[in-house]
Image (cartoon, helix red, strand yellow):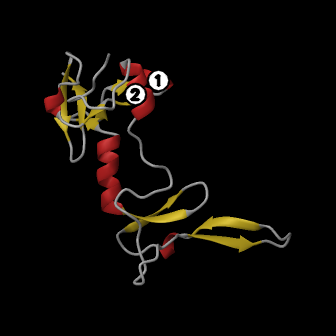
Amino acid sequence: MYNGCGGNHNRFNSIQDCWAGCARKKDQGRCIGGMAKHPNGTHIYCHEYIPKENGASEFVINESKCPEGYFCYKSGYAGFCCNSTSEEISSRNYNPKCSPENVSAILNPHAGRVFPLLGDSCEDEFCPTNAICKKWEFFAHCCLK
């Protein structure tokens, strides 16, 4: 049985089952550091539905609706004004690169998907023997030696 980093009640029969059930990925349709808000506390969206002559409407992104320091993140059904700095940090952690060549970190092919092999800390010793561990703000990742 694979017990995971540190072990807890969240256990799986194999590493493949763990990765299939717990793959770290961005929650689609949400901003990592929160959305921009109006002074009254409601969220600022950057999309519009433009009426068409046939009675339908067209979904359009309007970047200018986002305040300075935010960008418009388009999901399937809405445009969200996301904090640019938070998104950059998130991207650096969820899609890490290894210096100095700026190559992709070691990828994990489990569960039919390929994504960076991430851990909470280098102290968890989750990297293969041919790799070294590097830590960013949220996660650690593995780079070839």
Q: Is residue 86 visible?
A: yes
Residue 44 image label:
none
Q: Tell me: residue 30, above or below residue 94.
A: below
Counting from the top left corner in percent of width and height, residue 80 is at 49, 64
Label 1 SS? helix
Residue carrying label 1 = 111
Residue carrying label 2 = 19
Label 2 SS? helix
2 and 1 marks in contact (CB < 8 Å): yes
What's under tag 1, amino acid-wise? Ala
Q: Nearer the viewer, residue 94 or 39?
A: 39
Q: Nearer the viewer, residue 119 or 92?
A: 119
Q: Residues within 10 Å of mark 2 (few under 14, many from 20)?
A: some
Spatial CA distance of label 2 from label 1 is 6 Å
What residue appears at the point 54 percent right and 64 percent down from the top-left corner?
Answer: 79
Is 126 on the left or on the right of 21, as rendered? left
Counting from the top left corner in percent of width and height, residue 53 is at 84, 73
Looking at the rendering, in which quadrant would you find the C terminus? top left
Looking at the image, tell me whether mark 2 or mark 1 is earlier in sequence order: 2
What residue appears at the point 32 percent right and 16 percent down from the top-left corner?
Answer: 1
Q: Is residue 109 visible?
A: no
What's under tag 2, amino acid-wise? Trp
Q: Tell me: residue 17, above or below residue 95.
A: above
